[in-house]
Amino acid sequence: MPGAPPVDRQAIHDELERARTAFRRLLGTATEAELRRRTDGTLWTNEQLLFHMPFGYVLIRPLLVLMRVSSRLPNRIGRAFAGLLNAATRPFDVVNHLGPVGAVRVPGPRRMVATFDRVVADPHRRLDSETESGLARGMPCPDRRDPFFRNYMTVADLYRYPNQRFDFHRRQLTLTSAR
């Protein structure tokens, strides 16, 4: 977008690092009893929600590819695709809920920390290689799937998305260290 102010990359890097450090602390200080405790506002336990929290960072890579392709297409095609994804919200929500319920016992806390470190490192690396014009590219997005998706988002918005999602889910944790 011509004339748009430059994106504060360091602020995004700082947010990514803050989330990485917080996730390590949350898992490092949680007791077994706390991990089994229900969260506030979800049907998950703290452990299941912690398993789910890295997912926003995992999504960045495929969403960046999708955004780079879609941003070059006519806007009506992007809006139609976003509408299709909005229509699939209910089945997506079921899969989104069941994944952590069934899979949480597989990795364990230490592997969850290593996974989080790895998935946060990827946007750190990618952000530094983005051009200002690349960060300004955007596309219509499905806004019913996630409270942090807006009907139109830029690449810069996408880099901020997982941290917003992380903070939201962190407030739902009932761990002593989350307070």
Image (cartoon, rainbow, N blue to C red):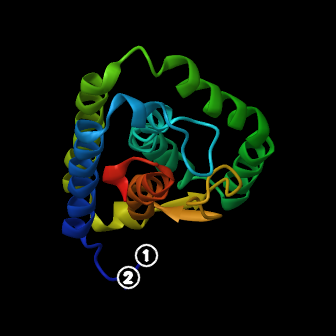
Query: Mark 1 packing: few (<14 Cα in 10 Å), some, or many (20+)?
Result: few
Q: Nearer the viewer, residue 110 or 157?
A: 110
Kind of residue indicated by mark 2: Ala
| Residue at image point 38% right, 82% down | 4
Residue 26 locus on image (x, y percent): 29, 44
Q: Which mark is residue 123?
A: none
Residue 134: name its quadrant.
Answer: bottom left
Query: For this view, does 68 lie left or right of residue 126?
Result: right
The quarter of the picture where residue 65 lies is top left
Task: Give the SS element for disc 1.
Answer: loop
In the image shown, does 90 or 37 lie closer to the viewer?
A: 37
Image spot of residue 172 (x, y percent): 51, 53
Q: Are marks 1 and 2 in contact (CB under 8 Å)?
A: yes
Q: Position of residue 29 (x, y in %)?
A: 24, 41
Compute the Cα span from label 1 to label 2. Answer: 6 Å
**How far across and how far down the image is residue 103, in percent?**
50, 18
Q: Quadrant of residue 160?
A: bottom left
Dot 2 surroundings within 10 Å: few (below 14), some, or many (20 or more)?
Answer: few
**Residue under label 1:** 1
> Which of 15/9 is in front?
15
Q: Which residue is mark 2?
A: 4
Depth check: 2 or 39 in front?
39
- At x 81%, y 44%, the residue is 87
Residue most toward the top?
106
Q: Residue at x 27, y 63 (%)?
A: 12
Query: Can residue 122 be seen at all in this image of the molecule?
Result: no
Q: Is residue 121 left or right of residue 153?
A: left
Image quadrant occupied by the C terminus: bottom left
Give the answer, above or below, for where 126 lies relative to 34. below
From the image, which quarter does the N terminus lie in? bottom left
